[in-house]
Amino acid sequence: MATKLTAAQIASAAGVDMVIANGADFHVIHKITEGRNHGTLFVSQSKEEVYLIDIIDKLL
């Protein structure tokens, strides 16, 4: 669990929200994206919006 919390700290510092959820539940990602209350959400303090597509474009 300590490793998961460290990962949450790193993600938050990078401005990324993160969810720690039960990996044994095959459908947990679907439930989370539907807005259902599964797992623990760590919200970053970043005010800047970052879009994955912009990062990918910079890499290509």
Image: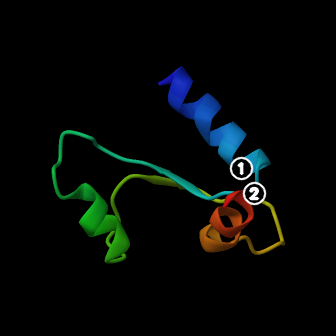
Helix, strand or loop for disc 1? helix
Direction from residue 21 to residue 46 in the image, left or right:
right
Looking at the image, residue 38 lies above or below residue 3: below
Residue marked by disc 1: 12
**Rendering coords of residue 2 (x, y %):** 55, 22
Quarter of the rendering containing residue 37: bottom left
Left or right side of 52 for 10: right
Rendered residue at 62%/67% (across/down) = 52
Gap between marks 1 and 2 measured at Cα? 5 Å
Residue at image position (34%, 66%) is 32
- Residue 35 numbered tag: none
Q: In this view, does 12 lie to the left or right of 34?
A: right
What amino acid type is highlighted by mark number 2? Answer: Gly
Mark 2 and mark 1 in contact (Cβ < 8 Å)? yes
- In the rendered image, residue 38, in percent from the top left (x then y), is placed at 33, 59
The quarter of the picture where the C terminus appears is bottom right
Return the residue nearer the eye: 38 or 30: 30
